[in-house]
Amino acid sequence: MIGKIKELMYEPEFIRNIGIVAHIDHGKTTLSDNLLAGAGMISEDLAGDARSLDFDEQEAARGITIDAASVSMVHNFKDHDYLINLIDTPGHVDFGGDVTRAMRAVDGAVVVVCAVEGIMPQTETVFRQALKENVRPVLFINKVDRLINELKLQPDELQNRFIKIIAEANKLIKGMAPEDKKAKWKVDVADGSVAFGSAYHNWAINVPIMQRSGLNFKDIIDYCNDDKQKKLAKKVPITEVLLGMVVEHLPSPLESQAYRVPAIWEGDIESEEGQAMIHTDSKGPLAVMVTNVSIDKHAGEIATGRVYGGTIEKGMEVYLVGSHAKARTQQVGVFFGAERVNTDNVPAGNIVAITGAKGAIAGETVCEDGKRIKEFEGIEHISEPVVTVAVEAKSTKDLPKLIEVLRQVSKEDPTIRIDINEETGQHLISGMGELHLEIITYRINEKGVDIATSEPIVVYRETVAGKIEKPVEGKSPNKHNRFYITVETLNPSIYEAINDGKIKEGKVKGKESAQVFIENGLDKEEARRVWDVYSKNIFLNMTRGIQYLDEVRELLVEGFESAINAGPLANEITVGLKFKLVDAKLHEDAIHRGPAQVLPSIRKAIFGAIMLAQPVLLEPIQKVFINTPQDYMGNATREIQNRRGQIVDMDQDGDMAHIESKVPVAEMFGFAGDIRSATEGRCLWSTENSGFERLPNELQKQIIKEIRQRKGLSPEPYGADHYVGG
């Protein structure tokens, strides 16, 4: 088997890189197990119960997938062997970052949907994550046995249920797939890009197989009713059907890199490295995109990545483009279940495990030291951290080790944000939700550091609700430099464009990006004068002919960014604002306009402007979806309303009620236990992060005060006079 993998690695037309994605508990890991069993990698009796890709003890204990896990296997289809590199991804909203990163490594995705629940919020999210990365989907409708055995559906009812799920999936594909792929990527029962089955009972079927085997839905119902699913699994084994579907409908690297590379790499496609990537050329310059970093007790840091061009070799000198650092690979190999198999080299089109690329983080671009290339686009995570805990080492002697472990953990999971305060010894970890932080805390303890954590703290954002009449003046400490700033809220179309990644964050060089701003609704004159896009704010220079301004440009941008990182209301990040520099007076002598003069003055002007424009706090919101029997609907809605939640939508399907609502994250702690007792354990629920909304007026003062006291600041924020007076 390993010999076969090593052979096939060099034949990109016979490689399929795929991810398995789904809503939580729709059966991804059980499905992956069965595919491994079919490939002879684990015993068939264990498949489904083994959950062999949940390597982590916490994964096994909680029965959920937390990390994306990689595995390679060989499948024979129409008399040819294919190498299938599979990544099993998490379904829980708190670990969505892993899905986004996995999608960068693969070309196709098997979207698993539970036949009973249908397409759920997280299914929509994984579709969005896949299609945004130009990854082609196929559909597997799982748990069909439950429709037959529990819901007693007849063949025509089964078909209606399937038609509804497929129509919803195609609606999502039509809405989010690249323009030229919308029609081609639609999933279709007739061509076999949709399969039905039961991952737990090891069988699956699609229309081409039905035609070949003569089975129909009525036969399947009989097998399930007569408790003969084992026999059914022998006739239509899930591995054959699903891997056949993968080989037939999902693209090889040769096909996919031609359209994926231009979308994720901004370099010159006509260059030598551009052409090597487009043609999956293993002899061209090296180009690897790191999608994940894990720490192995024995081997140290293992970087998983996709080789887009060239061949990565053992002992090779490589260059990390983002970190501007050199490294030497100690070993390279492929994944084989929980094991890594070392090979001397891994060519383009494969998923590689690199040992020794010290300093690499997810999103890093790796190339040969002698042939440096432009880096790949950063990986954009769909949601951002909204809950924080403070972490302290129980024993002071563990402090240095804790800092080391926190750095490791943030490498392994780039969706968390870590603030290390070496003076106080108190470190803040921000994550996607309660569960995410529990897992991170568990991992720190596991790495040998005993820690105490605070109660979870919610992350807020600052913005303004009004605008100011005249520019605000910020004076430098020596009174020789003055900057005049105005502030207003960003128009929604620009804010959305930054959120969706259409407008890239970062310093704006030249005027070439003006067009993007104009297309998204910014005034033509302003579009040519954007200096910086940072944390969903923009900074414009609207001055004309001011002497020496170019020399302090970098300082002004630095001052703007540091002011945004800790706003004047509660030291939280500021979002959604447009700042304009409308005038400036600068000292002619460079020595009098250095960082010590410029930084405080621009910060003061920005803070003063914010405090004059009705500053307000925004709080993070989660969408909460609940499926519960009718009898418990009242209890479930009461539970939402008691938490300042709003019911957005309600509908009924048979005797089940579906409730969609929005609830502030601050009110969601302990929700799991409460909703269980409110519905006597009879409900299914899930959440999805939904951005930030304005905190109700009656809570503004109280929350600002609480945050400031927690951060050791004066209880009341300073007024505008504090920043611009004197």
Image (cartoon, grey):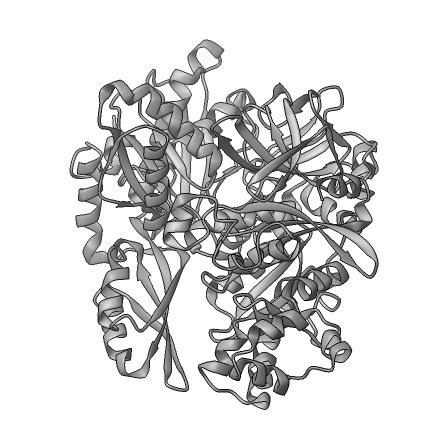
Relative vertical location of residue 468 with respect to residue 328 in this rendering, above or below: below
> Looking at the image, how many numbered discs can be counted on the residues?
0
Q: Position of residue 435 (x, y in %)?
A: 34, 50
Residue 555 is left or right of residue 564, and the answer is right
Based on the displayed image, in which of its 4 quarters is residue 451 positioned? top left
The N terminus sits in image quarter: top right
Q: Residue at x 23, y 73 (%)?
A: 638
Q: Position of residue 264 (x, y in %)?
A: 67, 44
The C terminus sits in image quarter: top left
Q: Residue at x 73, y 30 (%)?
A: 345
Q: Residue at x 28, y 60 (%)?
A: 672
Relative vertical location of residue 518 with respect to residue 270 in this rendering, above or below: below
Q: Position of residue 578 (x, y in %)?
A: 46, 44
Q: Position of residue 444 (x, y in %)?
A: 35, 33
Q: Residue at x 59, y 63 (%)?
A: 111
Q: Nearer the viewer, residue 235 or 633?
A: 235
> Can residue 502 be seen at all in this image of the molecule?
no
Based on the displayed image, in which of its 4 quarters is residue 209 positioned? bottom right
Residue 614 is left or right of residue 91, and the answer is left
Residue 286 is left or right of residue 32, and the answer is right
Q: Nearer the viewer, residue 58 or 540?
A: 58
> Can residue 530 be seen at all in this image of the molecule?
yes
